[in-house]
Amino acid sequence: MANQDDKLKLVISHAKEYGFVFPSSEIYDGLSATYDYGQLGAELKQNIRNYWWTAMTRMHQNIVGIDAAIFMHPTTWKASGHVDAFNDPLIDNKDSKKRYRADVLLEDYMAKSQAKISREIDKAKARFGDAFDEEKFRATNPNVLRAQEKINAVQAKMKAALEASDLEALKYLIDECEIADPETGSRNWTEVRQFNLMFKTEMGAVSGEAGIIYLRPETAQGIFVNFLNVQKSGRMKIPFGIAQVGKAFRNEIIARQFIFRMREFEQMEMQFFVKPGTEMEWYNYWKDTRIKWHKALGLGEENYKFHDHIKLAHYANAACDIEFNFPMGFKELEGIHSRTDFDLSSHEKFSGKKLRYFDPESNESYVPFVIETSIGLDRMFLAVLAASYKEEKLDDGSERTVLAIPAALAPVKVAVLPLVKKDGLPEKAKEIVDMLKLDFNLQYDDKDAIGRRYRRQDAIGTPFCVTIDNETLNDNCVTIRERDSMKQERVEIAKLPEIIRGKVGMQGLF
Ligand code: GAP
């Protein structure tokens, strides 16, 4: 299998070749950091969305889903802090004219030192074998200690600079670490500047500042402004949650790495409203619940880790990311944030409307605190696709490319394949198609040799292939082949729905 860099390239080209993801408006050479989902991508995305929606709403009696508008009253974004604080600190290299996020340059610098530490540990592990004590090694090895001290110092300075929005201090730190342009090696930097990430447009016929509205940079605010509508109309009792899936837009500066960072993307967010003082208990509950949701997919437990935020967002009193081991390394997949009462209180202030909950048990009225879980649907798509992509050497010396997508998420659940295109086999196969098509997304394929058809289905991640042969006409049995094990079994046609459902249903995930 290819190295990490090459793996991302392989995944991108596989995604295009098989109709998962295309560059947006490709006939015009594409539009940077925007992508279109093709015929299989749209199915996979829908299945991921469904898995999340089911986990949030059906599996929690006290969580309901909404679908708010993308356009919101512009004051929303004043109240949320996005107009004033949704900025990235940017720095330009004067020689290469390339623009970077100052914090990302520093994060990458620290990641390199971290990689050095991991190499030292791996070397020592190989040398000492079972006798190796990693904790002791970390506490005593001079190289590791030096690298860790350096990381800690940079991290502390970066945190202080970001929290104080001290752009000069950030620039000073970049110079102090002698960070060079990753592409050209030049250290000829401009000052650091703030850049707001919201897209603006104009509403109706009103021109100028008065008509400016924003494309929402997060779906969460659509939930906050509807807090009371949902609570009252649904007679919701705290603690309760509101979930939403929808598009969000950010004018990202560094938009690269395929669908990992896009300018138009989809978020799946849930705001959980709790009594003030109980938020840490719920923060831990959601950390635990969300990591279980991820791990249930079987993409490898070792591919997830928590990362506590160094710099808390303006609204949070605790925050962490669930990071996934993407082809580019461990990166943020989902955020879990304890947002205090910041948003509701701020909307109260800016709207002049009370956004409080009357607690019938304690007879008091308060602004609830909020725990938020927020995951990018496109990032989740990339995580599933990248972790599922495998090139395998088979026992007979041949090779296959297979997408071992968790069966419940697979875009096509079953392929129906008549062995030959004659002798009544296609007709029998079409009867099976009719029997299964309402319950399962399926493909019918009668072209090429059966081996090549299996390979095509492996490449798009179809969990089952059902083959109809001459014997089928006599015994009403078919051969069912399982994607990962490639095992084949003869089964009665009547049993197919049950067998397929057993593997591709969501029951296995919950
Ligand atoms: N409401 C909180 C919020 O929006 P965030 O950490 O900025 O928090 C949440 O975003 C999630 O949205 C991220 O963990 C990521 O999965 C996804 N996301 C953010 N920016 C993205 C982008 N430019 N492209 C794709 N996904 C993105």
Image (tube, grey):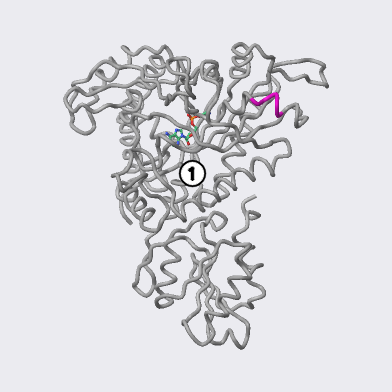
Q: Main secondary structure of the magenta part?
A: helix
Q: Is residue 304 above or below residue 2?
A: above
Q: Where is residue 85 shown, x and y percent of the image?
A: 45, 17
**Ligand 1 within 8 angstroms of badge 1 C-beta:** yes
Q: Is residue 119 above or below residue 92?
A: below
Q: Where is residue 344 shown, x and y percent of the image?
A: 63, 18
| Residue at the image position 62 percent from the left and 43 percent from the top | 53
The residue that mark 1 highlights is 380
**Quarter occupied by residue 123:** top left
Secondary structure beneath label 1: helix
Q: Is residue 227 magenta?
A: yes
User: Most extreme residue toward the front, as rendered?
Assistant: 205
Three-letter amino acid code at the position of disc 1: Met
| Residue at the image position 46 percent from the left and 55 percent from the top | 39
Q: Where is residue 476 shown, x and y percent of the image?
A: 63, 82
**Quarter occupied by residue 201:** top left
Q: Is residue 186 left or right of residue 49?
A: left
> Badge 1: how crowded within 10 Å, few (<14), some, or many (20+)?
many
Q: Is residue 143 magenta?
A: no
Q: Is residue 144 visible?
A: no
| Residue at the image position 38 percent from the left and 22 percent from the top | 88
Q: Where is residue 161 shown, x and y percent of the image?
A: 38, 14
Residues drawn in magenta:
226-230
| Residue at the image position 35 percent from the left and 50 percent from the top | 12
Quadrant assignment for the N terminus: bottom left
